Image (cartoon, rainbow, N blue to C red):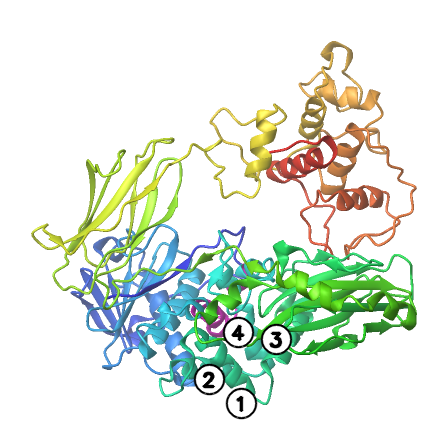
Amino acid sequence: MFLMISRRHLLASAVLNLVWILPVSAADLFTSGIENGLIQGNAVQTQHFQFEFSDVVGEQADSDGDGIPNLIEVTAEAAEESWDIVIDDLGYEEPTGDGSRLIVIMDDNDEYLSSSALGITSLLSNGNPYVAIDPWMSDAYLQVTMGHEFFHAVQFGYDPGFAYSYQGINFAEATATWVEDLIFDSVDDYALYIPEFLSYIDYSIFASIVPTGTLYEYGMNIWPRFLSEYYDNNVIKNVWETYFDSSIDFDSDLKLYEAVKDVVGEEGGDLEAVFQQFTLWNLNLDSYEEGDIYPEVFILEGEESQDYVLSDESYAPALFGSNYLYFENSSGSGEFSFHLVKPEGVSFAVSLVPYDGVNYDTDAAETVIIGKDDEMSEALSLSHVGAQDGVMAVISALNIDYDDGNNWEVFDEGYLYYYLADYGLNESEFEELMSGTEEELTEEIEETDGEKEGETTEYASDGRGQSSLTLSVVSFDQNSATFSWNRLDDNDIAGYELHYGTSSGSHANKLEIKTAYTTFSTVADLEAGETYYFTLRAVDKNDDKVGEESSEVSLTPEEWLFEDISFANPHYAAIENLVEMGIFEGYADNTFRPETEINRAELLKILVEGRDIEVDASLNKNCFPDVGEEWYSQYVCYAKYRGWIKGYSDGTFRPSDTVNKVEALKMLFNVYEMELSEDATVANLKYTDLDENAWYAIYVWKASSLGILEETVGGTFNGADGRNRGDMAEELYRYLVVEEGLKE
C-alpha cells in the first residue's frame, strides 16, 4: 500500500441531529459468518465489503445474539448504503478493479489510525484500496465516517496517485465530507466543518495550502454542496471523472481548476459567474437547502471614504477567494456608490447587496465582473437604499493569464485592491473622486501582492517510485509527539523503528512499530522544555534496515499553563496573560476549566481584583437580602457602594446565577468606570436579534466598536446566553489591550 487519506476529528460541542441506528439482522446483510481476516484476526463479509476486527471488537455488545457486534452491523449497513448511492445510483466506478470486496478494518488500538483520526483510506500492495475506521464512535459517526472513507476509496479506484495533486487533495476531502450528507442526510455532521471555510473565505477553493491549524479542506464541502444544488449531484461526478480522464490534455498544475471549468461550461455556465453566485449564496444562506444550520461568513468592516482605501493585506483575496466588506448606512442616504481599482491582468467580481438589518437581499444585488484587461471606468451603485441599514460589497479575485509552469502558486497568492465607497454623492461628484488615479494605484498594488500564509495538506505515502522515508510531525503537546511518514515501495518492509534522543545525531531511545501498514505513531513520556531529535527507519522481518533512514527532525515539547488548555485553544493568550497578572486563577488540580460557566459573584471578584482594588471585607457585607458574609460579599457590596451594580427589581443580587452576555458587558464597563448612559440612542447595532431601544444596547454597541466581541457582525448576539471562563477571559483581555494598553 502506498497512499493514505484521512478524516480527522472536528472539535465541536455537539453533532447536529444525531440519530440512533438499530443494528440490522445478519441474515439480511452478511454473506458469511466470522472467519480469519487478511489483516486482522477476524472477518465477516457483506456483498461488497469485508470487515476485519480484533478479538476485543468481537467481544462488544451483540443485541440480536448473532455473533456479530452491533458496531460492525451498523458500519456494514452504512457501507452497503454508501455503495448503493455512490455506485448504483450516481454511477461512480467500483473502488476495487478486480471485483474483490473492499476491506474495512475496525481499528480499535490506533494501529492504522492516528489518535486524531476517525478513519483513513489507503492502498494494499495489490493496488486495491482499504479503509480503517475507529470503532469507538457513536452510531451516527460510524455512519458518516464509513461514507466519507468509502468515497475516498472510490477516488483511489480511479487513480491511486490522485492525492499527489495539491488541489486534488483538498477537493477530495471537500467532496468526501459533502457525500456524507448525501448518503446520511439526517446526521448533518458536515455542517460542523463549514465554519472552517467561511472563516477563511479569502482563501481559494483551488488553493494548494490551507490556513494553518484549520480543517479548511473539510469545511470547503460547502463548495461541492453549492455546485450540487445549483446544478445537480452529477456535477461532482462529472468533475472527478473529467479530472481523472487521462485523455484530456490539462496543465498538471491546473488539473482541478480546468476540470471544474470544463464541467461548468458543459452545464451552460461560466465558472467566474458561477463562483460569483456562490459568494452570494454564502451571504444569503437561505439559498442552501440546509442553510439555516450554517454559520455566517466572515465580514470585514468597510470604510466609507472620500479617498481610495487599500484593502487589508491580511485578507487580500486569492483567485476564487473573496472579501465581504460591510458599509453601514449611518447617514440614511438613498444611494451607495462603489469603485474598485484592481491589479492589471487579474479579473475581479464585485457584488453590492443591500442589508435591511435582518436579511441580505441578494436578489436586489448589483453585480459586475471586471475582465483581466478591463478598467472599471464607471462606479457601481445601488439606488434607493435609504431605508437599508447598510450595503455589503462582495469582492472576489477570479482569474489571470497562466504561464507554462508552477501555475498552482497563483491560487496561494492574495491580490490587493483599492476601493472608493460613499453614501449620498451624486454621479458627477463621485466620478470626480474617481478620476485620474487608477494607473498610479494599480502600480502600487502590484508591488505589494504576496503569498497567503498556510500549510500544505499532506497525506502519508510509501510513494510509488519513492526511495526514501520522510518523517513529519503531526502534533505534539507537553509530554508526547505524534509523527506520520510515507511508505516505501518495498515488499521486504515488516515495520518501522523511530529512534530519538536529546542530542542531534545521537538517538539512544527506540520505538518499534511492528507492522508495515502503520504510518502514524506517538512517542510518549517526553519531558517538557527538552529538545528531542527523531529519525525513522524501515526494517524487515529480521529487524535489518531497509533503504535509508529519514532525515532528522526536532521539536521541543512545551509545558502548558494548565492541563486542560493547550496552545491550540483560541483563548490561550488571553488566559495566560490574565493569570500572569493575577486577574484569573486556575484550580487546585492545575486545570482552568474554560467551559465552566461563571456566576455573577465570581465575575465581580475577577473585575474588582483586575483593577487591583483592595477591599475591606469587614466593611462590605450584608448589602443584599441574598448577600451576607460569604466570600464574595466584599466584592458585591463594594461594587454596590461604588454604584457599579444595583441588583434586581425584587432587591436581590442572585450571586450564584450564571452571568449572561449583556450583564457581563455592563459589569465590565461599570467596574472600569467607562461612563455609558442606558438612555443613549444607538443605531445600527449590526446584530439581527438586538433591539436598539433595549437598556443594554449601549453596552453591546460600545463593545462592538472596541472590537472586544467574538460575535460576527451581521449575525445574532444571543445576549441571554451564559458566559464561561474562557469567553470572559477573552473579552476582558481584549478590553485591557484596547483601553489599558496591555500587550501579550
Q: Give the alpha-carbon distance from disc 4 to disc 2, as whole Å.
A: 12 Å
**Quarter of the rendering occupied by the N terminus:** bottom left
> The magenta stretch spans which residues?
171-192
Query: Which residue is the site of mark 3?
Result: 275
Q: Amino acid at mark 2?
A: Asn
Q: Amino acid at mark 4?
A: Pro
Measuring 11% from the left and 61% from the top, which residue is drawn there? 492
Query: Which residue is the site of mark 1?
Result: 266
Q: Earlier in the sequence, mark 3 or mark 4?
A: 4
Q: Nearer the viewer, residue 474 or 518?
A: 474
The vertical placement of 644 against 19, above or below, is above
Q: Earlier in the sequence, mark 4 or mark 1?
A: 4
Query: Which residue is the site of mark 4?
Result: 224
Give the secondary structure at mark 3: helix
Q: Amino acid at mark 1?
A: Glu
Do residues under tags 2 and 1 come within 8 Å of each other at their CB atoms? yes
* Residue with the most extreme top position: 618
Do residues under tags 3 and 1 come within 8 Å of each other at their CB atoms? no
Residue 356 position, x and y percent, is: 82, 65
Q: Earlier in the sequence, mark 3 or mark 2?
A: 2
Query: Which residue is the site of mark 2?
Result: 238
| Numbered disc in front, either 3 or 2 | 3
